[in-house]
Image (tube, coloured by chain):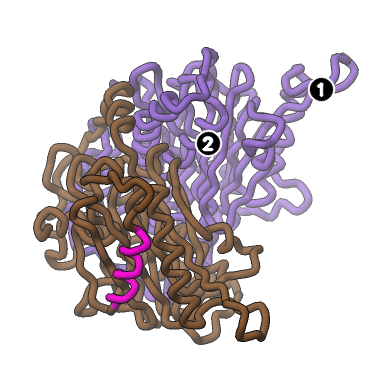
Chain colours: A brown, B purple
Amino acid sequence: MQMSGNDLGDIPGLTVGQAACSTAETGVTVIVADSPAIAAVDIRGGGPGTRETDALGLSRLVGQVDAIVLAGGSVYGLAAADRVCTLMGKEGRGVGLTGRDDIPKSPIVPAAILWDLDRGDKRWGAEPPYRDLAEAAYRSRSTSINLGAVGAGKGAMAGAHKGGVGSASAAIAGGRVAALIAVNSFGSPYVPGTPHFWAAPFEQGAEFGGRGVGPHTGIADFPPDTAMAAMAGARRNTTIGVVATDIPLTRAQAARLAIMAQTGMARALRPVHAPTDGDILFVLSTGKGPAPDTEAAQLRLLTLGTAAADVVARAIARGVYAAEHMG
Amino acid sequence: MQMSGNDLGDIPGLTVGQAACSTAETGVTVIVADSPAIAAVDIRGGGPGTRETDALGLSRLVGQVDAIVLAGGSVYGLAAADRVCTLMGKEGRGVGLTGRDDIPKSPIVPAAILWDLDRGDKRWGAEPPYRDLAEAAYRSRSTSINLGAVGAGKGAMAGAHKGGVGSASAAIAGGRVAALIAVNSFGSPYVPGTPHFWAAPFEQGAEFGGRGVGPHTGIADFPPDTAMAAMAGARRNTTIGVVATDIPLTRAQAARLAIMAQTGMARALRPVHAPTDGDILFVLSTGKGPAPDTEAAQLRLLTLGTAAADVVARAIARGVYAAEHMG
């Protein structure tokens, strides 16, 4: 059932570019839609860093986006989206509210950042690298995606382990669904004290090492308040990503899909949605056919949402596995 | 680390009453706070049925509640909360906006319902039983809680299996956290085709049968759209519940705790947060000490939220196990 890529590049209508700086240990991942894509976002962490997410609200004007940007660098990384916006505007992409050629269109480029400021040398003063990284990522985009310590996941950590960019895809009736996640979680992708990924039940083949499900029950370990707060005080986190499908969706259906997809994060990371996480998932639909706004269409989301949660969980484990083994 | 009860009755300051009608296969669960408790709610399903949840918004006037009502009966079950409200008002409980004795106070009784209308004989015409069931539940309340096909879980289904009321508790530094959940999920509490609960990694002792974790990987089964939509069209669902702690919290901290607790639902049920679910969790804090509104206090939620998610997952499995084995 898997496409050969087993990643977000399997979704027709999307390209992905990534760039990273080894010195600053940070980077940018850009997901570009060939034409405006229906979009939604779901945010569950206590410390999100975002741009243009309010525009995606169901009662807002714009429901389609030109690109999504994921970046390291905390608040500085948001500048990556500014660069992508400018590049796309120069190409004539974006929402045009007038018919005039002398007025730039407005590309819609929502973005989310993760916190990697304590890794590498970030003494960039007034010149953070995110605009340049964004341009390099934008210009290098393709349907082939590298996983691990690349792009927005360059400096990422997954709990106490190296984090990174992961991706996975699945075929379902009527189309495909895939996820690309930059894993920089406060929580761990592993069952405590074991090499077993929380996401193991959903592993396809040996896509993240084939270590299987641990036999562990009775798990109740959470460090005491003081230790956990010290861990959290020493670093900030967040997991950010994109779920995409070529099945046509309404904006409201995309919003429901984002909510269901978030449950994949809960199955792959523990704890998750913590005060120190951001935990932001964008949803893109590149489908161009009719998307009926009916209850029957809502019910079709049961399958798509289940599959979306699974690919999110798998993408998280694949990202950590790749960062540890191919980094 | 468990209290002897291993349920919501372990939280000082709360009592629980349940009542059910065997003919109509439905019922009511009432959670009463000895004195007003800090509260929050998190709603993730596509089909919630609620009362007084808007009042809990962080910018709203009231942040403390007198009771929470969980009921079967879909929209008809909301009447259960009206009866509890009236009974508590008669006792002088509630928010008094005047100093006058001749003006009733306003008890704050948020409620959530689940859909069990296709089970038992619901031909109640103009006299649904929820007011009477609520009064019976209210008057019978104690700190001893029955699990399984009781109270709001009387007619509940968990996927294709019997559902019911489950509960679990855990001790953490500074206090306790517990959950009581009425499990009526569209999704299944079991790994597909196995007797293994999704919640198995978190099982303490043999609190839900000690069946262990299944060795299954490669799970990617989701019925095709048409089959899943037919299943969903034939029944509506939702999982509803309460997480409580005696650790003092601000309202904002209670809201974050509700979000983290929801991840326990994702770990115990698949799919979850579907269009046909409601998936509503209330949080209550009965703690009476100071609850500092500081970042350090937010970080303490890492431990409490992790434990809350675990007790939610365990409560779900315990409810299904009790419904199947003690019903």
Horizontal side of B272 relative to B60 (left or right) equals left
Image vertical order of residue B167 relative to residue A23, above or below: above
Name the magenta segment's main secondary structure. helix
Residue ID at (69%, 30%): B62
Residue type, numbered disc 1: Leu
> At which x and y percent is residue A146?
20, 68
> At which x and y percent is residue A32?
39, 74
- Circle 1 is placed at which residue position? B97
| Chain containing the residue with disc 2 | B
Image vertical order of residue B74 relative to residue B40, above or below: below
Q: Which mark is residue A292?
A: none
- Mark 1 Cα-neighbour bin, 10 Å: few <14, some 14–19, many ≥20: few
Do the residues marked 2 and 1 share a common chain?
yes
SS class, disc 1: loop
Can residue A201 be seen here?
A: no
Lower sequence index among marks 2 and 1: 1
Q: Nearer the viewer, residue B160 or A95?
A: A95
Quadrant of the image containing the C terminus of chain A? bottom left
Marks 2 and 1 close (CB-CB < 8 Å): no
Magenta-span inclusion, residue B260: no
Quadrant of the image containing the N terminus of chain A? bottom left
- Circle 2 is placed at which residue position? B255
Horizontal side of A141 relative to B315 (left or right) equals left
**What's the magenta region?**
A130-141
Can residue A50 be seen here?
A: yes
Magenta-span inclusion, residue A140: yes
Residue type, numbered disc 2: Ala
Q: Nearer the viewer, residue B207 or A46?
A: A46
